[in-house]
Image: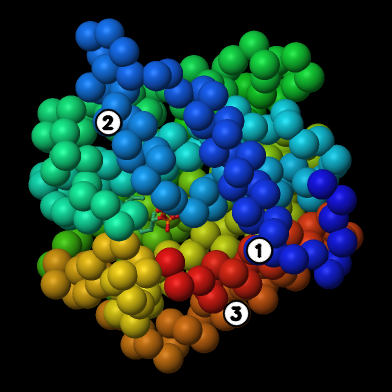
Amino acid sequence: MPLQPDLDLKTYLSKKREMVDAALKDYLPEPEGLTSDLIEAMRYSLFAGGKRLRPILCLAGADAVGPLEKDPLPVACALELIHTYSLIHDDLPLMDDDDLRRGKPTSHKVFGEPMALLAGDGLLTEAFRLMTSPEMSVRISADRLLRVIRLIAHAAGYGGMVGGQAVDIQWEGRKADLQVVKFMHTHKTGALITASVVSGAMLGGAGESEISAITAYGEHIGLAFQIADDILDIEGDSAALGKRVGADIQKGKMTYPAVLGMEESKDIQNTLVQTAIQDLRPFGSSAEPLRQIARYIIERKT
Ligand code: GRG
């Protein structure tokens, strides 16, 4: 896709989303045989209408450093599988106990708790199978691919998303300070967002200085994304979001607005986005999608 400074983000996002959706349909098996209910549950959440932000960040990270179009797709889709698994597990009664996600009944409401748990497990493990598919090793060197997989495993695991979720659960209903809330946000949400854009850049052939710049960008937008999510939970529209608002306050979750107030939280998210855009200074117009995505992250309504 030719990239220009006057790029229309809406068109860019919808083209990438279509590309990801088509690939996901291709990669996921059809429900059949004895495991058809499990596959149905995996597909239900995956195709429930997410924004596909993580795969798009992966593709945009690759676009920023090189003209490759197709190579990152299995990794981009794997990121969405991991994200979807985390949402299914997060919605379970033993965690956040939510009935609605992406505007639809949550997985356990439709398929029951055991099948929802297994659908999440199935998506997580399939992500790693996808990243190691022969398609990936045709043009990406084994060293580079291993580095990408290790990065994503770290971001999804105890050192990232799972670790952040554990701290989030342990601090529910307790008054946390900014240091703890920042830890939760950067791990629970920020880590996978950072890994998404960095993995794309790595697959696109980025050198070490480009990887450092993109990592800084990812960390800044990752935290901004979760602060925006905190704000949407207070000021957002539940119909547009496809989930109930006000849940954080009701569950006694520690958020940026709860610790710092709304005005300061908005100032911080704006500063984070400006910093993220500055992180991209080494890149030219090829990074324009990433610049615009940074702004979109705090302007979004869903
Ligand atoms: C259960 C291991 C485990 C982890 C859960 C990410 C997470 C950790 C829980 C999700 C809870 C939540 C609502 C976090 C806020 C940030 C977030 C990940 C929002 C949803 O992401 P979007 O807005 O969703 O990208 P869509 O539906 O567009 O894909």
| Residue 41 circle label | 2
The one nearer the camera, 135 or 95, is 135
Name which of mark 1 and mark 2 comes first in the sequence: 1
Q: How far, Cα to Cα, is label 1 from label 2? A: 30 Å
The one nearer the camera, 166 or 24, is 24
Q: Hey, what amino acid is under mark 1?
A: Lys
Residue 154 x, y percent position in the rendering: 48, 36
SS label for mark 2: helix
Whether residue 2 is visible, yes or no, is yes
| Residue 271 circle label | 3
Judge: label 3 CB < 8 Å from ligand 1. Answer: no
Q: Hey, what amino acid is under mark 3?
A: Thr
Q: How many marks?
A: 3
Quadrant containing the C terminus in the rendered view: bottom left
Q: How is the image coloured?
A: rainbow
Q: How far, Cα to Cα, is label 2 from label 3? A: 40 Å
| Residue 10 circle label | 1
Residue lying at 60% horizontally and 79% vertically, measured from the top left: 271
The one nearer the camera, 101 or 232, is 101
